[in-house]
Image (cartoon, rainbow, N blue to C red):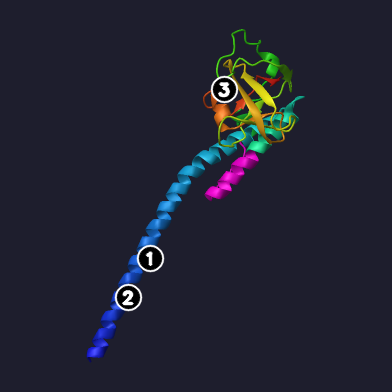
Amino acid sequence: MYSRRKNSRTRKVIIGIAAAALAGGAFAVSTGMSSAGENCAGLDQALQNNLNFIADQKANPDALSDARIANRQDVVNLINQRRAAAGCTGDVQAAPPAQATTAPTQEATKPPATEAPAGNDQGATGDVVCKGSTVTLSGEAGAPAASSGTFPIGTTLKVTNLDNNKSITVKVATPSGSCVLLNNAAFEEVREAGKFLIRRAVIERVG
């Protein structure tokens, strides 16, 4: 009799512990999902912005569209890598071209800036290269640097954003498929708030 009561009491304790473990696991999963969702929201928005730009370029091509699309595709690939690492599963698609948030523009539609460039330009000047190229970010972390498919690692490039007259001089640290991509730190020095593309850029090879 005593043995039966003891066994019954033991089973109840085990069931209680299992229920508590399941509840704790559910809480942990719920918390993790919430954290991932916050990270994915920003990544999904950045991905859609770039997909919208590519869709616009395909719908309204010009002589530089192929270069712009290749530039943005590099960024899309990096964002997708970060989304995969964060466990993002949202189906992000480009908006129809007529509704896309970034409309294509001609680099020559605005007059050249007349004010002296400001920012971290270190007073450097050099030969203008990759005329007409747009500049965006590579998504790489670290100190200000650039990547390029045109110039070898170690090349010094000065990038000027004519829309806000800010410049930065950086060295090519990694290869890419574009004339120049700026890493996150470098792009922050010359970007316009809320924009992921420098449409009117002057790229100079220094030294």
**Residue drawn at point x = 73 percent, y = 28 percent:** 65
Residue furthest to the top in view is 114
The residue closer to the viewer here, 23 or 180, is 180
Pick the quarter of the image with the N terminus.
bottom left
**Residue drawn at point x = 70 percent, y = 29 percent:** 68
Alpha-carbon distance for marks 1 and 2? 12 Å
Residue furthest to the right in view is 63
Task: Determine which residue is flagged by label 3.
Answer: 190
Q: Amino acid at mark 1?
A: Leu
Pick the quarter of the image with the C terminus.
top right
**Residue drawn at point x = 35 percent, y = 63 percent:** 23
In the image, is residue 79 part of the stretch drawn in magenta? Answer: yes
Image height of 116 relative to 101, above or below: above
From which residue to which does the magenta span run? 76-95
Alpha-carbon distance for marks 3 and 1? 50 Å
Q: For label 1, count other residues whose C-alpha is less than 10 Å away and answer few (under 14), some (14-19) or many (20+).
A: few
